[in-house]
Amino acid sequence: MPSRRHFLASAALLLAAPFHAQAQDVPAEARRFIESLIAELSAIEARERDDARRRAALDAALRNRVALARIGRFMLGASRAAATPAELAEYDRLIPEFILADVRGEIAKLVAQSITIDEVQTRSARDALVRSRFRRRAGGTVRVDWRVTATEGQPLQLVDVYVNGVSRFVIRRDEFQAIVKARGMAGLLAELRQGGKRA
């Protein structure tokens, strides 16, 4: 099992250059991408004791690695068609910070645990699923699968996270649809504003 020290020691090399996925090396690139992400998040968790500085550092590490616009469109789903241009503009402005806070809250608490990357499953020429397990110090294992993808000539980005088989962003999409159905797009935007303040 790779140790946390191994991840931290290799972080500088892994972070030195962006990952440009090609069809023949997606599994290796995807593994290095996730190892790099975990290494940096682990280093931040170990280094930053101040809550505000830790949140800012985690968000900076995640911002360019997470496909924020793509995930935001997915979570809004069919409700996008009924939204006004002004509502869409506000949603697109608010959603990146909401996603960052959501990923940070769900994933950052796991990265200090022992991790094993089991396998990388190639889904398409530029799309892969990195399957890992976090073994909690208190006992028990959490399965975390990371879906990463890249468009032609672009770096890999994280597009989904599955915790014990459940997609974090599918859960959010269902929540968003329920809010829009009950309270309209205005209600969802109100929730996003409050979510940003809580983050």
Image (cartoon, rainbow, N blue to C red):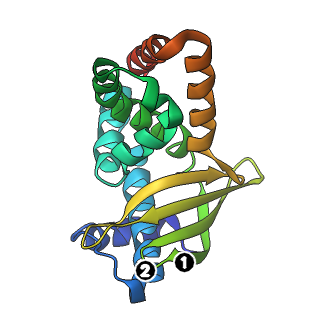
Q: Can residue 38 be seen in this view?
A: yes
Question: Which residue is pictured at 34% across the width and 77% down the height?
Answer: 21
Q: In which quarter of the image is residue 153?
A: bottom left
Please state if 106 lies on the left or on the right of 138 as rendered: left
Residue 47 in view in this figure:
no
Q: Residue tagged by mark 1?
A: 122
* Sequence-earlier tag: 1 or 2: 2
Q: Could you tell me residue 95's position as x and y percent?
A: 38, 31
Image mark count: 2
Using the image, determine if residue 92 lies above or below residue 24.
above
Q: Dot 2, how many residues are within 10 Å of its Cα: few (below 14), some (14-19), or many (20+)?
A: many
Q: Which residue ends up furthest to the left in the rendered image?
A: 17
Q: Do the residues labelled 1 and 2 touch (CB within 8 Å)?
A: yes
Q: Name the residue under label 2.
A: 26
116 lies above or below 190: below
Residue type indicated by callout 1? Thr
Say above or below: 97 vs 111. Answer: above
Q: Which residue corresponds to the image point at 32% horizontal and 67% vertical from the top-left?
A: 151
* Type of amino acid at the residue the image marks with label 2: Val
Q: Position of residue 158 (x, y in %)?
A: 43, 57
Furthest toward the bottom, the residue is 24
Residue drawn at the location 44% of the way across and 45% of the way down: 71
- Alpha-carbon distance for marks 1 and 2? 7 Å
Q: Give residue 37's quadrant in the image.
A: bottom left
- The x, y position of residue 29, in whole percent, is 40, 77
